[in-house]
Image (tube, rainbow, N blue to C red):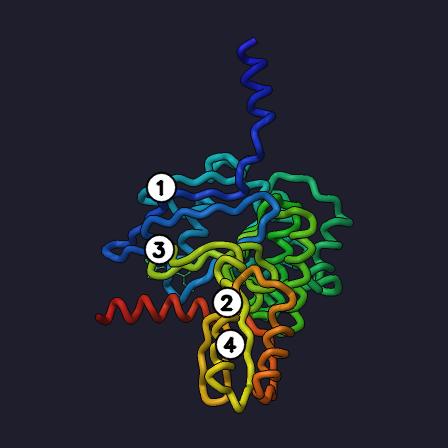
Amino acid sequence: MIDDTATRLLTELPPASAAWGSGLRKRYRRRVAVDGVSLAVGRGEVVGLLGPNGAGKTTVIKMLLGLVRPDAGEVLLLGRPARDPQARARVGYLPELFRYQPWLTAAEVLDLHVRLAGVIVPDRDRRECLATVGLADRAGDRVGGFSKGMQQRLGLAVALVARPELIVLDEPTSALDPIGRADVRDLLLSLKARQVAVLLNSHLIGEVERVCDRAVILDKGRVAASGTLTELLGGRELRLRLDGVTPEAEVRLAAAGRVRRTGEAYTVELPAQQDPATVPDLVADLVVLGVRVHAVEPGRVTLEERLLDIVRADQAEESR
Ligand SMILES: Nc1ncnc2c1ncn2[C@@H]1O[C@H](COP(=O)(O)OP(=O)(O)OP(=O)(O)O)[C@@H](O)[C@H]1O
């Protein structure tokens, strides 16, 4: 009876996060690489991990995957201990530095990883996986003759082939040409549509901005900021080029939001939840007040600007 109740309660629990880490710390000799990081990747969620070189991104990823033992903190991978083979078999991983056996063909590398994962993947699915990463016609070629970008594509195929529930990609596009990067972006969007969770470490911030639901910004081993893109980037901006701005017009601009001015360029920070009439009403009122409106451009703080702000503020604090 008690067993039945326990089983029912367990099956009714919401599914555990795809990856979950709490209070993670790692020190290499005297260097603290990761200092109390907590983060979670929900089922079907795409999370970007950002930060300058040496911030601790790869170390966090390796701790989440059970490849590096944390000095402190806890990790669960698909609700299980990170070293549990049952959890690992359902996770795809593209490491930052990868090198495949040069004497094997692309198809053989894939076969090897399927066998290591202990799963069954039909031949047709393996071929399809190589086609997804643009290597359909190179399946029989030895990896030793592959370019860096082709090896990275093969790494992606290895991460994808066993149809994992979580994919961890550490710099997946560092060796790819612009078309390859766009392909990976499409691939990430199709994974998202299939509810596959993704943890993406990338220095290509535009990539993260386009595909991620949330981002975690690491700096010096700590979480400097995290949240949905709207939470991280705040409201929208309106960039205007104006002349003939009277004091009354300045009051009208300030009523719309905080104003910054450089010569004729005015930037108004609009609230996150704005009325669709805000911008046309503002422009109409400015014209009535005698202002000449040369340009009106909606804008938004980019993730890159936000990241630079955070990292530079931290550097300034440190040099004080
Ligand atoms: N195996 C190791 N032995 C000693 N120090 C290490 C080791 N791995 C990482 N570190 C140190 O830990 C810190 C964080 O490194 P990590 O590779 O996690 O950073 P990262 O954010 O992934 O950097 P990048 O963007 O350059 O890849 C660095 O100071 C690095 O020198």
Mark 1 crowd level (few <14, some 14–19, many ≥20, 10 Å Cα): some
Mark 2 crowd level (few <14, some 14–19, many ≥20, 10 Å Cα): some
Q: Nearer the viewer, mark 4 or mark 1?
A: 4
Distance from Cα at disc 1 to Cα at disc 2: 29 Å
Q: Residue at x 52, y 70 (%)?
A: 256
Identify the image quadrant of the C terminus: bottom left
Asked if disc 2 and disc 4 are in contact, CB closer than 8 Å, the reply is: no
Q: Nearer the viewer, mark 1 or mark 2?
A: 2
Q: Point out which mark residue 303 bears.
A: 2
Q: Nearer the viewer, mark 2 or mark 4?
A: 4
Asked if disc 1 and disc 2 are in contact, CB closer than 8 Å, the reply is: no
> In the rendered structure, which disc, 4 or 1, sits on the residue that comes first in sequence?
1
Q: Residue at x 33, y 60 (%)?
A: 220
Query: Which one is nearer the viewer's eye here, 244 or 101?
Result: 244
Q: Residue at x 52, y 64 (%)?
A: 271
Badge 3 amino acid: Arg
Q: Is residue 51 visible?
A: yes
Distance from Cα at disc 2 to Cα at disc 4: 26 Å
Residue 46: give x, y in percent of width and height. Answer: 58, 53
Badge 1 amino acid: Gly
> In the rendered structure, which disc, 3 or 1, sits on the residue that comes first in sequence?
1
Q: Residue at x 51, y 87 (%)?
A: 245
